[in-house]
Image (cartoon, coloured by chain):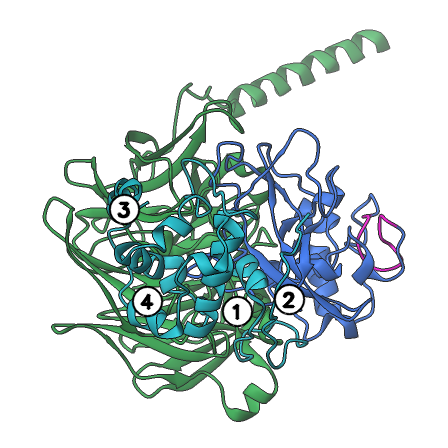
Amino acid sequence: MERSSPVRRPVWSAIVGMAILVGAPALAYQPRINYMLQCLGCHGPDGRGEPGHVPSIRATLAPLSGFAAGRHYLLQVPGVALSMLSDRDLAALLNWMIPAFGGVQPRQFRAFTAAEVARYRHEPLLEISATRARLMRQLPLQQ
Amino acid sequence: MTRTARYAALAAGLTLACRSLVAAAQLPPDPAGVVAALPATASAHWVWVNDIVFPHMSDGQARLVDGDTGRFLGLLSTGVAFEHVVLAKNGSVIFSPETYFSRGTRGTRTDVVTLYDPVHLTPRGEIAIPPKRAVTMPMMADAGLTDDGAFLLIYNYTPAQSVTVVDTRSRRFAGEIETPGCALVYPTGPRSFFSICADGALLDVHLDDAGHVSSRVHTRNFFDVSADPVTEKGVRLGNRWLFVSYGGTMHSVDITSRGLEPGPRWSLLSDTERRQNWRPGGLQQLAVRARPDLLYSIMHRGGVETHKDAGKEIWVYDLDRHRRVRRIVLRSLAGSIQVTRDDNPLLFAAFIGSSRLEVYDAQTGRYLRSVEDVGTTPTLLVTP
Amino acid sequence: MSLFDGWMEASSRAVARRTSRRGLLGSFGALLVGVAALPLLPVARGAGKPAKTGKSGKAEGGHQDATQDPTSCDYWRHCAIDGYLCGCCGGSASACPPGTAQSPVTWVGTCHNPADGLDYVISYNDCCGKSSCGRCLCNRNEGDMPLYVPFRSNDYDWCTGSSAANIPYHCSTARVLSRAT
């Protein structure tokens, strides 16, 4: 039921064959797999979330990545900011998600870098509902 | 007298004799409607065995046992997916965060905090709360009172994370605090608590007197989540919260005038014991007592994936010298332990896979007694 | 070993009679260092009705290798499952029993399949809306994290986060999403 999107440049890393035991070094998976392990459980296989319960990232990811406040929000939501993924793997994950869910081509958005992730993820959002609501109102203006 | 007449006379005599014996032994009738009540003051040796009743989760219960006599004292019927009761510090009321569905196992969900009379074990009232209470394997940190008992805090998971605040003085819902990325409630003062965040930092929350947020800070990292995470089954002694990791390393969060500070780390295990794969495990795996300050930990042997397993041993540590002082071998597996707060403390041990509660002397480890049928799936042990 | 047997016989709990030995490990019971090293135990001798356990040779599905038996707690996909196996409840490892709702909100982990040597991404969706199935209780915790890392934690009742799924937890599935590597 999960169809993998073609990954143009798989990110292979060391020690992926070992059993997943806590205590092993954090393993680096392809972004598609990281999405499953870190995000899919709540946001769903296609990023649609659950109306009223879990926000859709499918609808908002690409537009939010288009302006500064939106990009900061994406890096400060708890699932991203508090993730056990490295800055580099988080950037790779976001850059995979935007075309996969947002229906935009890679060259149509400014890719996240590890440096940008590092800059903002350490200021996790505490006032999350209000910030999201404000940004959603700004979205039409940013298009 | 004919033989028949003789027998008749004998029978009549015996009947008269029996009847008068019966009349002398006859019990007075019992009055109807007699209902037992508990003493006005709880004993320090009582224990509430909380029971999520996993195979029949609509029938949650909190069941009260006298640890000294082994007598079953009564129970509370506490709804769907029940976690645990919270006892008011002065014993005047029992709080119970509960969930109900309008048709038992389906329908409209309502969550309430029920207030129970501690003597008659009857509901005195309820406070409606958002139907968001986190339903988890029962943890003590699912709900708790601030230090002066003014606020009851309840962790919510929908999957958005927040904390419901109930004002116990006005007996009203005071508000809901967003705690994104952070879980559970660990009270730290009359108007403060922390939650543990997914990155190993803490969310340090302070409330005003109305129960609203006055400050909320995501601290620096306290715990390394990736290498050897601490379990969420922390226990508190004075101004220190103690947490143990999968690998048996003790961490602490100290409540100081400067805020929350990490305390010293030390291991429950010698190098040999670590090599032998000894590790802490269980559902309510730690207990503490004061004077002397001691930590009790359920221990078993197993790989890291057994970090929730019950064990047959409890290792006792001096918290000042970070040294083990006793190794108690239990008669049965334990997944939950609790130690009473008095000067002749009891150690209670239960296991979710058993209906037996075992009682030991907490100072010597001597087995005292067992109580049968304390629950279907006993989870958390709560003592006054 | 005899201690475990003794405990099993002494237990008066109905769920103990119906679960595999492996199922009583994890938070529900463990005395043992390594499961694979142990001989099979009869479940609750004298309990009356013979239990249909998931152990190899005695599985409901008749499989000899428990790691390939979906009704066994040792099934390879169940490396971090926590609850009743839907395969014993009228569903399967990937399907909910009749009249229950599969919760779309869940947690996702990985398990290793010894049959092909690969790691797979496993989604542990719960089936919800009826009271507990009560059969094939199983709790394993490979890679499981505490509640404060919710998307890696099997200790949440995952019958949450949607209108279809209410709390009444019925059973757990273990759906393959993908190869992990």
Mark 1 burial class by Cα count in 10 Å: few <14, some 14-19, many 20+: many
Which range of residues does the magenta coloring cover?
Answer: C51-61
Of badges 1 and 3, nearer the viewer stands 3
Q: Position of residue C70 (x, y in %)?
A: 78, 52
Magenta span includes B316: no
Residue type for callout 1? Gly
Residue type for callout 4? Arg
The residue identified by callout 1 is B281
The residue identified by callout 4 is A121
The residue identified by callout 3 is A135
In what element is the residue under mark 3?
helix
Q: Position of residue B311 (x, y in %)?
A: 57, 69
Q: Whole-Å distance between the Cαs marked 1 and 3?
A: 44 Å
Q: Which residue, as the protein is rendered here, is positioned at the far bottom? A: B271
Q: Which residue, as the protein is rendered here, is positioned at the far front? A: A107
Q: Which mark is residue C30?
A: 2
